[in-house]
Image (cartoon, rainbow, N blue to C red):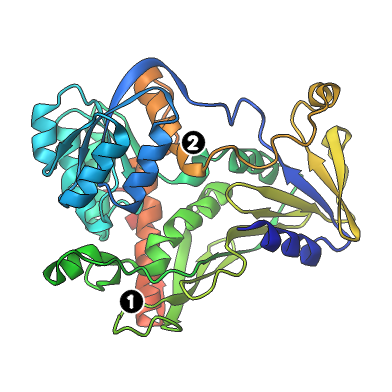
Amino acid sequence: MNETDRRTFMRQSAGAMAAVALLPELGLARPVRLREPVVVGVIGAGRQGRAILGELQKMEGVSIGAICDIDERRLDAGVRRSQGAEGFADYRAMLDKRADVKALVIATPTHLHRDIALAALAAGRHVYCETPLAHTVEDCQAIARAARGSSGVFHAGLQGRSNPVYKLAWTFFRSEAVRDPVAMRAQSNRKNSWRTPAPDPARDREFNWRLDPAVSLGLAGEQGTQQFDVFHWYLGAYPVRARGGGSIRLHADGREVYDTVHCGLDFESGVHLHYEATLASTYGGEYEVLHGTNASMWLAWTHGWMFKESDAPTQGWEVYANRQRFHNDQGITLIAEATKLAAQGKLQEGIGLPNPPLYYALGDFLRSVSEGAPVVCGADEGARASIVGILANRAVVTGGTVEIDPSLLRGG
Protein backbone atom coordinates (compact mmCIF):
# COMPACT_ATOMS: atom_id res chain seq x y z
CA MET A 1 0.00 0.00 0.00
CA ASN A 2 1.39 3.41 -0.94
CA GLU A 3 1.66 6.38 1.40
CA THR A 4 -1.30 8.22 -0.15
CA ASP A 5 -3.60 5.24 0.43
CA ARG A 6 -2.29 4.89 3.99
CA ARG A 7 -3.01 8.54 4.80
CA THR A 8 -6.50 8.22 3.29
CA PHE A 9 -7.22 5.22 5.48
CA MET A 10 -6.05 7.05 8.57
CA ARG A 11 -8.25 10.04 7.77
CA GLN A 12 -11.33 7.90 7.19
CA SER A 13 -10.85 5.44 10.03
CA ALA A 14 -9.45 7.26 13.02
CA GLY A 15 -12.58 9.17 14.05
CA ALA A 16 -12.73 9.44 17.82
CA MET A 17 -10.29 6.56 18.28
CA ALA A 18 -6.58 6.88 18.93
CA ALA A 19 -4.37 5.42 16.20
CA VAL A 20 -1.46 3.42 17.55
CA ALA A 21 1.32 2.54 15.14
CA LEU A 22 2.56 -0.98 15.79
CA LEU A 23 6.33 -0.85 15.71
CA PRO A 24 8.24 -4.09 16.21
CA GLU A 25 10.89 -4.40 18.87
CA LEU A 26 14.31 -3.80 17.42
CA GLY A 27 15.34 -7.44 17.90
CA LEU A 28 12.38 -8.80 15.94
CA ALA A 29 13.37 -6.91 12.79
CA ARG A 30 17.11 -7.45 13.17
CA PRO A 31 19.19 -8.28 10.08
CA VAL A 32 19.72 -11.97 9.38
CA ARG A 33 23.20 -13.06 10.43
CA LEU A 34 23.62 -16.81 10.65
CA ARG A 35 25.97 -18.37 13.18
CA GLU A 36 26.84 -21.17 10.77
CA PRO A 37 26.97 -20.60 7.00
CA VAL A 38 24.31 -22.21 4.83
CA VAL A 39 24.47 -22.98 1.10
CA VAL A 40 21.06 -22.47 -0.49
CA GLY A 41 19.55 -23.63 -3.74
CA VAL A 42 16.58 -21.90 -5.38
CA ILE A 43 14.23 -23.90 -7.60
CA GLY A 44 12.26 -21.56 -9.81
CA ALA A 45 13.78 -18.35 -11.17
CA GLY A 46 10.64 -16.51 -12.20
CA ARG A 47 9.24 -13.37 -10.55
CA GLN A 48 9.11 -14.85 -7.04
CA GLY A 49 12.42 -16.63 -7.49
CA ARG A 50 14.09 -13.35 -8.40
CA ALA A 51 12.63 -11.71 -5.31
CA ILE A 52 13.94 -14.58 -3.18
CA LEU A 53 17.42 -14.29 -4.65
CA GLY A 54 17.45 -10.58 -3.86
CA GLU A 55 16.50 -11.15 -0.20
CA LEU A 56 18.97 -14.04 0.28
CA GLN A 57 21.81 -11.86 -0.94
CA LYS A 58 21.19 -9.43 1.93
CA MET A 59 21.83 -12.10 4.56
CA GLU A 60 25.15 -12.66 6.28
CA GLY A 61 26.24 -16.29 6.24
CA VAL A 62 24.09 -17.27 3.25
CA SER A 63 25.56 -18.30 -0.09
CA ILE A 64 23.54 -19.25 -3.16
CA GLY A 65 25.07 -22.42 -4.52
CA ALA A 66 22.61 -23.50 -7.19
CA ILE A 67 19.61 -22.26 -9.17
CA CYS A 68 17.19 -24.36 -11.17
CA ASP A 69 14.67 -23.41 -13.84
CA ILE A 70 13.41 -25.18 -16.95
CA ASP A 71 13.47 -21.91 -18.92
CA GLU A 72 16.95 -21.08 -20.17
CA ARG A 73 16.48 -17.31 -20.17
CA ARG A 74 15.24 -17.20 -16.60
CA LEU A 75 17.95 -19.60 -15.48
CA ASP A 76 20.73 -17.53 -17.07
CA ALA A 77 19.35 -14.35 -15.50
CA GLY A 78 19.18 -16.02 -12.09
CA VAL A 79 22.74 -17.29 -12.32
CA ARG A 80 23.98 -13.83 -13.28
CA ARG A 81 22.04 -12.29 -10.42
CA SER A 82 23.46 -14.72 -7.86
CA GLN A 83 27.09 -14.18 -8.90
CA GLY A 84 28.50 -17.66 -9.24
CA ALA A 85 25.69 -20.12 -8.52
CA GLU A 86 25.59 -23.24 -10.67
CA GLY A 87 22.62 -23.48 -13.00
CA PHE A 88 20.45 -26.56 -13.52
CA ALA A 89 17.54 -27.23 -15.85
CA ASP A 90 16.38 -30.23 -13.77
CA TYR A 91 15.96 -30.17 -9.99
CA ARG A 92 16.81 -33.88 -9.79
CA ALA A 93 20.22 -33.17 -11.28
CA MET A 94 20.72 -30.42 -8.70
CA LEU A 95 19.88 -32.83 -5.89
CA ASP A 96 22.23 -35.49 -7.27
CA LYS A 97 25.20 -33.24 -8.00
CA ARG A 98 25.12 -30.61 -5.26
CA ALA A 99 25.13 -32.45 -1.96
CA ASP A 100 26.53 -29.29 -0.36
CA VAL A 101 23.27 -27.45 -1.03
CA LYS A 102 21.51 -28.35 2.20
CA ALA A 103 18.65 -25.83 2.06
CA LEU A 104 16.26 -25.52 -0.87
CA VAL A 105 13.70 -22.83 -1.64
CA ILE A 106 10.86 -23.94 -3.92
CA ALA A 107 9.45 -21.06 -5.95
CA THR A 108 7.94 -22.87 -8.93
CA PRO A 109 4.28 -22.69 -10.01
CA THR A 110 2.04 -24.04 -7.26
CA HIS A 111 0.98 -27.22 -9.08
CA LEU A 112 4.63 -28.30 -9.43
CA HIS A 113 5.47 -28.07 -5.71
CA ARG A 114 4.54 -31.61 -4.67
CA ASP A 115 7.04 -33.64 -6.71
CA ILE A 116 9.90 -31.25 -5.98
CA ALA A 117 9.16 -31.06 -2.25
CA LEU A 118 8.88 -34.83 -1.90
CA ALA A 119 12.13 -35.40 -3.81
CA ALA A 120 13.98 -32.78 -1.75
CA LEU A 121 12.75 -34.22 1.55
CA ALA A 122 13.64 -37.76 0.44
CA ALA A 123 17.15 -36.49 -0.36
CA GLY A 124 17.50 -35.20 3.20
CA ARG A 125 17.37 -31.50 2.33
CA HIS A 126 15.84 -28.67 4.33
CA VAL A 127 12.93 -27.13 2.43
CA TYR A 128 11.26 -23.73 2.28
CA CYS A 129 8.16 -24.02 0.10
CA GLU A 130 6.16 -21.07 -1.14
CA THR A 131 2.46 -21.14 -0.42
CA PRO A 132 -0.05 -22.35 -1.38
CA LEU A 133 1.82 -25.62 -0.83
CA ALA A 134 -0.05 -27.26 -3.71
CA HIS A 135 -3.13 -26.91 -5.88
CA THR A 136 -5.07 -29.91 -4.54
CA VAL A 137 -6.03 -31.03 -1.06
CA GLU A 138 -4.40 -34.41 -1.68
CA ASP A 139 -1.06 -32.86 -2.70
CA CYS A 140 -1.05 -30.59 0.35
CA GLN A 141 -1.61 -33.57 2.59
CA ALA A 142 1.11 -35.57 0.82
CA ILE A 143 3.66 -32.79 1.40
CA ALA A 144 2.66 -32.53 5.06
CA ARG A 145 3.04 -36.30 5.55
CA ALA A 146 6.47 -36.31 3.89
CA ALA A 147 7.61 -33.38 6.04
CA ARG A 148 6.48 -35.12 9.23
CA GLY A 149 8.54 -38.16 8.22
CA SER A 150 11.65 -36.11 7.46
CA SER A 151 14.49 -35.25 9.83
CA GLY A 152 15.05 -31.94 8.09
CA VAL A 153 13.44 -28.53 8.43
CA PHE A 154 10.32 -27.79 6.42
CA HIS A 155 9.13 -24.19 6.43
CA ALA A 156 5.92 -23.13 4.71
CA GLY A 157 6.20 -19.63 3.29
CA LEU A 158 3.32 -17.99 5.14
CA GLN A 159 5.00 -14.65 5.63
CA GLY A 160 2.64 -13.13 8.19
CA ARG A 161 3.91 -15.47 10.92
CA SER A 162 7.47 -14.20 10.46
CA ASN A 163 6.53 -10.55 9.99
CA PRO A 164 7.82 -8.47 12.96
CA VAL A 165 4.89 -6.04 12.76
CA TYR A 166 2.38 -8.90 12.72
CA LYS A 167 4.13 -10.66 15.59
CA LEU A 168 3.83 -7.56 17.72
CA ALA A 169 0.22 -7.02 16.67
CA TRP A 170 -0.55 -10.64 17.61
CA THR A 171 0.51 -9.99 21.21
CA PHE A 172 -1.94 -7.08 21.38
CA PHE A 173 -4.71 -9.03 19.69
CA ARG A 174 -4.37 -11.89 22.17
CA SER A 175 -4.55 -9.48 25.11
CA GLU A 176 -7.28 -7.27 26.55
CA ALA A 177 -6.06 -4.46 24.28
CA VAL A 178 -8.35 -5.70 21.46
CA ARG A 179 -10.49 -8.22 23.33
CA ASP A 180 -13.40 -10.03 21.66
CA PRO A 181 -13.32 -10.30 17.83
CA VAL A 182 -16.28 -8.60 16.19
CA ALA A 183 -15.65 -8.76 12.44
CA MET A 184 -12.80 -9.14 9.96
CA ARG A 185 -12.08 -8.07 6.43
CA ALA A 186 -9.18 -8.10 4.00
CA GLN A 187 -8.37 -7.16 0.46
CA SER A 188 -5.66 -7.51 -2.16
CA ASN A 189 -5.97 -4.89 -4.89
CA ARG A 190 -3.46 -4.54 -7.68
CA LYS A 191 -3.50 -3.77 -11.39
CA ASN A 192 -1.76 -6.66 -13.08
CA SER A 193 -2.95 -8.89 -15.89
CA TRP A 194 -1.26 -12.03 -14.48
CA ARG A 195 -0.26 -12.67 -18.10
CA THR A 196 3.38 -13.41 -18.96
CA PRO A 197 4.73 -13.30 -22.54
CA ALA A 198 5.91 -16.76 -23.55
CA PRO A 199 9.05 -17.13 -25.72
CA ASP A 200 7.16 -19.68 -27.83
CA PRO A 201 3.37 -19.72 -28.40
CA ALA A 202 3.43 -23.46 -27.70
CA ARG A 203 4.56 -22.68 -24.16
CA ASP A 204 1.89 -20.08 -23.40
CA ARG A 205 -0.04 -22.39 -21.07
CA GLU A 206 3.13 -23.28 -19.18
CA PHE A 207 4.07 -19.64 -18.62
CA ASN A 208 0.52 -18.53 -17.84
CA TRP A 209 -0.40 -21.28 -15.43
CA ARG A 210 -2.21 -18.79 -13.17
CA LEU A 211 -4.74 -18.33 -15.99
CA ASP A 212 -5.23 -22.08 -16.51
CA PRO A 213 -8.34 -23.14 -14.55
CA ALA A 214 -7.07 -26.73 -14.47
CA VAL A 215 -4.25 -25.79 -12.08
CA SER A 216 -4.78 -22.21 -10.96
CA LEU A 217 -6.22 -21.42 -7.53
CA GLY A 218 -7.16 -17.94 -8.69
CA LEU A 219 -6.93 -14.89 -6.49
CA ALA A 220 -8.63 -16.55 -3.53
CA GLY A 221 -6.04 -19.33 -3.44
CA GLU A 222 -2.87 -17.85 -4.84
CA GLN A 223 -3.18 -14.55 -2.96
CA GLY A 224 -5.80 -15.18 -0.33
CA THR A 225 -3.96 -18.10 1.30
CA GLN A 226 -1.34 -15.75 2.72
CA GLN A 227 -3.95 -13.38 4.10
CA PHE A 228 -6.38 -16.01 5.38
CA ASP A 229 -3.57 -17.47 7.44
CA VAL A 230 -3.16 -14.21 9.35
CA PHE A 231 -6.70 -14.67 10.67
CA HIS A 232 -6.12 -18.39 11.38
CA TRP A 233 -3.09 -17.47 13.43
CA TYR A 234 -4.70 -14.62 15.35
CA LEU A 235 -7.92 -16.48 16.09
CA GLY A 236 -6.35 -19.88 16.64
CA ALA A 237 -9.20 -21.24 14.52
CA TYR A 238 -10.12 -22.14 10.94
CA PRO A 239 -13.26 -21.43 8.94
CA VAL A 240 -16.04 -23.98 8.66
CA ARG A 241 -17.59 -22.56 5.50
CA ALA A 242 -16.61 -20.56 2.41
CA ARG A 243 -18.87 -18.60 0.08
CA GLY A 244 -17.76 -16.72 -2.98
CA GLY A 245 -18.08 -15.43 -6.49
CA GLY A 246 -16.22 -13.46 -9.09
CA SER A 247 -16.14 -12.01 -12.58
CA ILE A 248 -13.85 -10.53 -15.20
CA ARG A 249 -13.95 -6.77 -14.83
CA LEU A 250 -10.95 -5.60 -16.89
CA HIS A 251 -8.89 -8.31 -18.56
CA ALA A 252 -11.39 -9.59 -21.12
CA ASP A 253 -8.72 -11.44 -23.12
CA GLY A 254 -10.35 -14.84 -23.29
CA ARG A 255 -9.33 -15.95 -19.82
CA GLU A 256 -11.55 -18.08 -17.61
CA VAL A 257 -9.90 -17.26 -14.27
CA TYR A 258 -11.63 -14.26 -12.68
CA ASP A 259 -9.70 -11.01 -12.29
CA THR A 260 -12.00 -9.87 -9.46
CA VAL A 261 -13.29 -12.07 -6.64
CA HIS A 262 -15.05 -11.90 -3.32
CA CYS A 263 -15.49 -14.54 -0.69
CA GLY A 264 -16.68 -14.93 2.87
CA LEU A 265 -15.26 -17.28 5.47
CA ASP A 266 -17.44 -18.23 8.43
CA PHE A 267 -15.89 -19.36 11.71
CA GLU A 268 -17.60 -21.58 14.26
CA SER A 269 -17.51 -18.78 16.84
CA GLY A 270 -19.80 -16.71 14.61
CA VAL A 271 -17.16 -14.22 13.51
CA HIS A 272 -16.96 -13.66 9.75
CA LEU A 273 -14.18 -12.69 7.34
CA HIS A 274 -15.05 -10.77 4.17
CA TYR A 275 -12.35 -10.90 1.48
CA GLU A 276 -12.01 -9.12 -1.84
CA ALA A 277 -9.24 -9.23 -4.43
CA THR A 278 -8.85 -7.75 -7.89
CA LEU A 279 -6.34 -7.34 -10.70
CA ALA A 280 -8.27 -4.36 -12.01
CA SER A 281 -7.60 -1.65 -9.40
CA THR A 282 -4.79 -0.70 -7.05
CA TYR A 283 -6.92 1.37 -4.66
CA GLY A 284 -6.33 0.46 -1.03
CA GLY A 285 -3.63 -2.08 -1.81
CA GLU A 286 -3.33 -5.12 0.45
CA TYR A 287 -4.33 -5.26 4.10
CA GLU A 288 -6.19 -7.09 6.84
CA VAL A 289 -8.52 -5.52 9.41
CA LEU A 290 -9.61 -7.10 12.69
CA HIS A 291 -12.29 -5.37 14.74
CA GLY A 292 -12.49 -6.04 18.48
CA THR A 293 -14.62 -4.64 21.27
CA ASN A 294 -11.71 -2.61 22.71
CA ALA A 295 -9.80 -1.77 19.52
CA SER A 296 -9.42 -2.51 15.83
CA MET A 297 -6.24 -3.44 13.98
CA TRP A 298 -5.26 -2.51 10.47
CA LEU A 299 -2.30 -4.53 9.15
CA ALA A 300 -0.64 -3.74 5.83
CA TRP A 301 2.40 -6.06 5.78
CA THR A 302 5.08 -3.40 6.30
CA HIS A 303 2.99 -1.23 8.64
CA GLY A 304 0.31 -1.70 11.25
CA TRP A 305 -1.95 0.48 13.39
CA MET A 306 -4.32 -0.11 16.26
CA PHE A 307 -7.37 2.10 16.79
CA LYS A 308 -8.50 2.16 20.41
CA GLU A 309 -12.17 2.61 21.23
CA SER A 310 -12.86 5.71 23.28
CA ASP A 311 -14.25 3.62 26.15
CA ALA A 312 -11.41 1.08 26.14
CA PRO A 313 -9.57 0.73 29.46
CA THR A 314 -6.00 1.96 29.75
CA GLN A 315 -3.51 -0.90 29.41
CA GLY A 316 -0.39 0.78 30.80
CA TRP A 317 1.76 0.83 27.68
CA GLU A 318 0.40 4.26 26.66
CA VAL A 319 3.17 5.85 28.74
CA TYR A 320 5.58 4.71 26.02
CA ALA A 321 3.66 6.48 23.27
CA ASN A 322 4.82 9.17 20.90
CA ARG A 323 1.85 11.21 19.71
CA GLN A 324 1.29 11.98 16.04
CA ARG A 325 -1.38 13.99 14.28
CA PHE A 326 -3.34 12.53 11.37
CA HIS A 327 -5.19 15.52 9.91
CA ASN A 328 -7.74 16.43 12.65
CA ASP A 329 -7.13 13.34 14.77
CA GLN A 330 -4.36 12.79 17.25
CA GLY A 331 -2.77 9.36 17.11
CA ILE A 332 -0.34 7.51 19.32
CA THR A 333 2.79 5.90 17.95
CA LEU A 334 3.85 2.93 20.04
CA ILE A 335 7.63 2.59 19.97
CA ALA A 336 9.67 -0.16 21.56
CA GLU A 337 12.48 1.03 23.84
CA ALA A 338 11.05 4.56 23.62
CA THR A 339 13.17 6.01 26.44
CA LYS A 340 16.39 4.92 24.81
CA LEU A 341 15.31 6.12 21.37
CA ALA A 342 14.10 9.46 22.73
CA ALA A 343 17.49 10.04 24.37
CA GLN A 344 19.08 9.41 20.99
CA GLY A 345 16.59 11.62 19.15
CA LYS A 346 15.39 8.65 17.10
CA LEU A 347 11.73 8.28 18.04
CA GLN A 348 10.62 8.53 14.41
CA GLU A 349 13.02 5.86 13.17
CA GLY A 350 11.86 2.33 12.57
CA ILE A 351 8.31 3.11 11.46
CA GLY A 352 7.61 0.33 8.99
CA LEU A 353 9.77 -2.67 8.21
CA PRO A 354 13.28 -2.09 6.86
CA ASN A 355 12.90 -5.18 4.62
CA PRO A 356 10.01 -6.87 2.80
CA PRO A 357 8.09 -9.55 4.73
CA LEU A 358 9.68 -12.21 2.49
CA TYR A 359 13.07 -11.40 4.04
CA TYR A 360 11.90 -12.32 7.55
CA ALA A 361 10.24 -15.56 6.44
CA LEU A 362 13.41 -16.71 4.66
CA GLY A 363 15.44 -15.61 7.68
CA ASP A 364 13.33 -17.71 10.04
CA PHE A 365 13.81 -20.74 7.79
CA LEU A 366 17.57 -20.32 7.62
CA ARG A 367 17.89 -19.76 11.36
CA SER A 368 16.10 -23.07 11.87
CA VAL A 369 18.55 -24.72 9.48
CA SER A 370 21.70 -23.07 10.84
CA GLU A 371 20.93 -22.68 14.53
CA GLY A 372 18.18 -25.18 15.26
CA ALA A 373 15.66 -22.42 15.99
CA PRO A 374 12.04 -23.63 16.21
CA VAL A 375 10.22 -23.70 12.88
CA VAL A 376 7.89 -20.71 12.75
CA CYS A 377 5.50 -22.22 10.20
CA GLY A 378 5.69 -25.93 9.44
CA ALA A 379 4.16 -28.11 6.75
CA ASP A 380 0.98 -28.93 8.68
CA GLU A 381 0.18 -25.25 9.15
CA GLY A 382 1.05 -24.58 5.53
CA ALA A 383 -1.24 -27.39 4.41
CA ARG A 384 -4.16 -26.13 6.51
CA ALA A 385 -3.91 -22.59 5.13
CA SER A 386 -3.49 -23.90 1.58
CA ILE A 387 -6.54 -26.17 1.89
CA VAL A 388 -8.64 -23.21 3.06
CA GLY A 389 -7.38 -21.28 0.00
CA ILE A 390 -8.24 -24.20 -2.29
CA LEU A 391 -11.77 -24.46 -0.92
CA ALA A 392 -12.27 -20.69 -0.98
CA ASN A 393 -11.35 -20.73 -4.67
CA ARG A 394 -13.80 -23.57 -5.21
CA ALA A 395 -16.53 -21.38 -3.69
CA VAL A 396 -15.53 -18.50 -5.97
CA VAL A 397 -15.53 -20.67 -9.10
CA THR A 398 -18.89 -22.26 -8.34
CA GLY A 399 -20.43 -19.06 -7.00
CA GLY A 400 -21.80 -21.04 -4.10
CA THR A 401 -21.09 -22.33 -0.62
CA VAL A 402 -18.45 -24.89 0.29
CA GLU A 403 -18.48 -26.59 3.68
CA ILE A 404 -14.99 -27.06 5.13
CA ASP A 405 -14.69 -30.49 6.73
CA PRO A 406 -12.55 -30.04 9.88
CA SER A 407 -10.97 -33.46 9.23
CA LEU A 408 -9.26 -32.02 6.14
CA LEU A 409 -7.37 -29.61 8.37
CA ARG A 410 -6.09 -32.25 10.77
CA GLY A 411 -3.53 -33.67 8.35
CA GLY A 412 -3.54 -37.04 6.68
Secondary structure type for disc 2: helix
Q: Is residue 76 above or below residue 398?
A: above
Q: Is residue 111 left or right of residue 193?
A: left
What residue lies at 29% left-to-right and 51% top-to-bottom?
Answer: 46
Q: Are marks 2 and 1 in contact (CB under 8 Å)?
A: no
Residue 204, quarter of the rendered image: bottom left
Given residues 226 and 93, the one toward you in this image is: 93
Q: Is residue 146 left or right of residue 278?
A: left
The picture places residue 105, in percent across and down from the top left corner, at 29, 38
Q: Is residue 145 above or below residue 275?
A: above
Residue 117, quarter of the rendered image: top left
Q: Is residue 362 above or below residue 248?
A: above
Residue count near mark 1 (Cα–Cα under 10 Å), binned few <14, some 14–19, many ≥20: many
Residue identifier under label 1 = 257
Residue identifier under label 2 = 360
Secondary structure type for disc 1: loop
What residue lies at 46% left-to-right and 72% top-to-bottom?
Answer: 279
Q: Tell me the kind of residue under disc 1.
A: Val
Q: Tell me the kind of residue under disc 2.
A: Tyr
The picture places residue 340, in percent across and down from the top left corner, at 80, 21
Q: How many marks?
A: 2
